[in-house]
């Protein structure tokens, strides 16, 4: 009996010598629940230097260390690995988190397996717990969990061994409306992230081989019905010791809705453009190349649409070269728009049409363009000129017309040209108008000075000033200019308004 005890002690001593230098932690326990011995690795995994600090018994061990599983479920008395090995249970790869009661900020993660040593008769002689330190691995996994959960990009992870989802982040739940319970532990065939994928066969082949799945469009079914357009991609990775596939997604539904709205907007614009009753065209902003014309423009210009498309306005000769193209380029380049500017449109037959042109810059398929609208005023101007001619034919002696009326009739005849608007009688002072009127009556400078009671030099200064204002160079030009505008001088008008004396 004594020999057997000595033999057992000798074996245990040899066992201790063998396991002392192991990197794995080893705790030896007597069948009576006494903690017999622990190697340095096991003590280090509990943050103690002496075996006694682990506790003299299993009960004291439970008092000094609290254990819980990785899902935060606390282990009750009787469920500790040390309890289970005492009960004779054999187990492997039990992962637990160990927290020191004395300092709860100190935590370790252990993977535990059991071993029962028996004596010659087959009875339990020594119970063994073998520990592997997984603290660093668990820390890395926690960092991955936090990063994965906080990533705004929608993502799920499935296990390749059974193709079931084991992780899902908040981005995926918010994008789809699924709850976490509706995703986790479901098969990829139940929640198909590759639904209607453009390269579905390739994706399934890569998933089965655990290889990278390239980006592709797919339709993701939603829990409330309907689907969402996404771009999905797969990347193999390991979670713990398990081969997995990380699926990431890009929500393309906003783009699809935007494209749909853009199509509808373009359709409405196209219909309105074609149906506009006024001549309208769209041209590029850089070279004024015609992109589109409506039926009214084709009818007015005489050109077929195919004769104009992709052709620069200058090469087609749509506008009068003298008054159209150069000015149009310059104005659009400077201000980017036009509003009722008068230009002459040259039809295919060579006819010149007076038009009011308005243009605004628009973007068509990300290309800067001009939308140009023309209003044909040729008939209106012809009617105005005919009216003026009729009035002048009837009223040959226009001396009784007021000065204001004469100027208005002259302006109508001139067609309200831009140079007339800039250089008119309104630019002259009252004295300069008097001088011009007397010049129209044929008076020389000295005669004008005598009539107005001015010095001859003063009259000459007034004449030079009105030449400058009206861009004229001689007395004859000034008289013609005034006559064309119906200006005959103040004294002449005043004389015409006096009643003639009656003779007896």
Image (cartoon, rainbow, N blue to C red):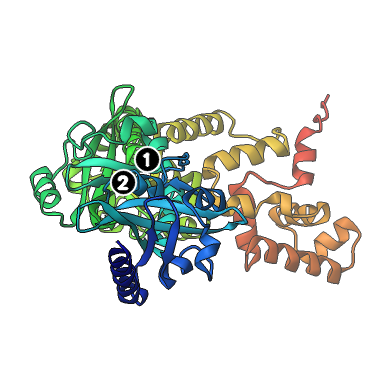
Q: Nearer the viewer, residue 372 or 58?
A: 58
For label 1, the residue is 172
Q: Residue at x 37, y 51 (%)?
A: 31
Q: Quadrant of residue 27?
A: bottom left
Judging from the image, what secondary structure is the residue with disc 2 in?
A: strand
Q: Position of residue 485 (x, y in %)?
A: 61, 46
In the displayed structure image, the side of residue 385 where residue 279 appears, left or right: left
Please give the label number shown on residue 249: 2
Residue drawn where x is 83% and y is 29% of the image? 501
Q: Quadrant of residue 252?
A: top left
Few, some or many C-alpha atoms within 10 Å of disc 2 (few <14, some 14-19, many ≥20)? many
For marks 1 and 2, give the one nearer the viewer. 1
The location of residue 417, given as percent across then percent down, is: 54, 48
Q: CA distance from mark 1 to mark 2?
A: 8 Å
Q: Are marks 1 and 2 in contact (CB under 8 Å)?
A: yes
Instruction: Tell which residue pokes out farthest to the top in this image.
Output: 224
Vertical arrangement, residue 84 with respect to residue 225, above or below: below
Residue 17 in the image: state x and y as whole percent.
Answer: 34, 76
């Amino acid at each position: 009996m004594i020999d057997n005890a000595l033999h057992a002690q000798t074996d245990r001593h040899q066992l201790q010598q063998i396991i002392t230098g192991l990197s794995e932690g080893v705790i030896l326990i007597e069948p009576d629940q006494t903690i017999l011995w622990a190697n340095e690795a096991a003590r280090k995994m509990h943050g103690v230097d002496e075996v006694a600090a682990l506790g003299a018994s299993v009960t004291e061990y439970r008092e000094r260390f609290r254990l819980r599983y990785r899902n935060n479920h606390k282990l009750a008395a009787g469920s500790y690995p040390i309890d289970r090995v005492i009960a004779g249970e054999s187990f492997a790869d039990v992962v637990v988190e160990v927290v020191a009661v004395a300092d709860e900020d100190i935590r370790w993660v252990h993977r535990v397996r059991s071993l029962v040593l028996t004596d010659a008769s087959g009875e339990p002689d020594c119970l063994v717990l073998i520990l592997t330190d997984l603290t660093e691995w668990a820390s890395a996994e926690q960092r991955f969990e936090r990063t994965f959960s906080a990533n705004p990009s929608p993502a799920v992870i499935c296990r390749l061994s059974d193709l079931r989802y084991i992780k899902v982040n908040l981005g995926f739940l918010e994008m789809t409306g699924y709850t976490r319970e509706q995703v986790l532990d479901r098969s990829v065939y139940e929640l198909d992230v590759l639904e209607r994928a453009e390269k579905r066969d390739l994706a399934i082949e890569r998933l089965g081989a655990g290889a990278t799945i390239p980006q592709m469009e797919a339709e993701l079914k939603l829990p409330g019905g309907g689907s969402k357009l996404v771009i999905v991609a797969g990347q193999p990775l390991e979670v713990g010791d398990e081969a997995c596939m990380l699926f990431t997604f890009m929500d393309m539904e906003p783009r699809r809705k935007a494209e749909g709205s853009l199509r509808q907007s373009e359709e409405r614009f196209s219909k309105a453009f074609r149906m506009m009753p006024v001549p309208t065209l769209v041209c590029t902003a850089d070279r004024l190349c015609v992109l589109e014309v409506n039926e009214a423009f084709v009818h007015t210009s005489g050109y077929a649409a195919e004769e104009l498309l992709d052709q620069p306005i200058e090469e087609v000769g749509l506008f009068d070269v003298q008054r159209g193209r150069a000015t149009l380029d310059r104005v659009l380049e400077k201000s980017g728009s036009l509003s009722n500017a008068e230009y002459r449109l040259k039809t295919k037959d060579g006819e010149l049409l007076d038009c009011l042109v308005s243009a605004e810059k628009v973007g068509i398929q990300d290309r800067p363009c001009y939308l140009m609208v023309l209003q044909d005023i040729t008939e209106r101007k012809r009617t105005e000129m005919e009216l003026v001619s009729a009035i002048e034919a009837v009223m040959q002696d226009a001396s009784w017309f007021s000065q204001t009326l004469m100027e208005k009739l002259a302006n109508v005849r001139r067609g309200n040209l831009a140079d007339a608007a800039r250089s008119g009688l309104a630019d002259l002072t009252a004295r300069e108008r008097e001088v011009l009127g007397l010049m129209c009556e044929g008076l020389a400078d000295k005669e004008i000075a005598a009539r107005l009671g001015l010095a001859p030099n003063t009259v000459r200064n007034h004449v030079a000033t009105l030449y400058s204002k009206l861009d004229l160079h001689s007395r004859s030009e000034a008289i013609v200019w005034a006559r064309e505008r119906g200006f005959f001088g103040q004294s002449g008008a005043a004389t015409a308004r006096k009643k003639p004396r009656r003779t007896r």
